[in-house]
Amino acid sequence: MPEQAGQEQGGVLRLCFQRSLYHPEAIRATAARFARLATFEVEEIGQGQDGQKQDSQKQDSQEIRVRITGVPAALMARMEDEFCNHALFQTIQMGRA
């Protein structure tokens, strides 16, 4: 699933999280926490009641997409695992609050 880019710019990862399992704020908090390691773009995507594709940041979006760029080659595999684990942890923490 990870897409490799040129070594000078680092790698690119694309992740997709289902909103039914992950809280969007947990994904954003995780991106902020990992920001010193790479660049993160978080976007919410889904279908509205009329079947039209929704813009980012909508409450009824169905998935949260994360594009991670500038990932050092040595961290590619680990970045995906650690990001996903931390996003799940943050979601659990937010659910308990």
Image (tube, grey):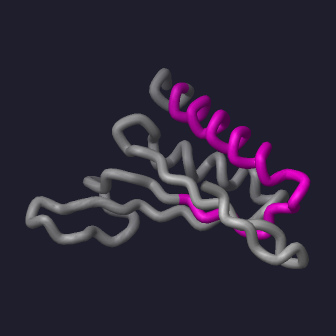
For residue 9, above or below residue 40: below
Q: Is residue 65 left or right of residue 33?
A: left
Res 46 quadrant in image: bottom left
Q: Position of residue 51 (x, y in %)?
A: 13, 65
For residue 92, above or below residue 80: above
Res 6 quadrant in image: bottom right
Q: Is residue 94 left or right of residue 10?
A: left
For residue 88, above or below residue 68: above
Res 2 quadrant in image: bottom right
Q: Is residue 58 magenta?
A: no
Q: Residue at x 49, y 25 (%)?
A: 97
Q: Residue at x 87, y 60 (%)?
A: 73
The furthest residue to the top: 96
Q: Position of residue 65 (x, y in %)?
A: 49, 59
Q: Nearer the viewer, residue 13 or 49?
A: 13
For residue 73, above or below residue 18: below
Region in magenta: 66-92
Q: Is residue 33 left or right of residue 17?
A: right
Q: Residue at x 77, y 47 (%)?
A: 77
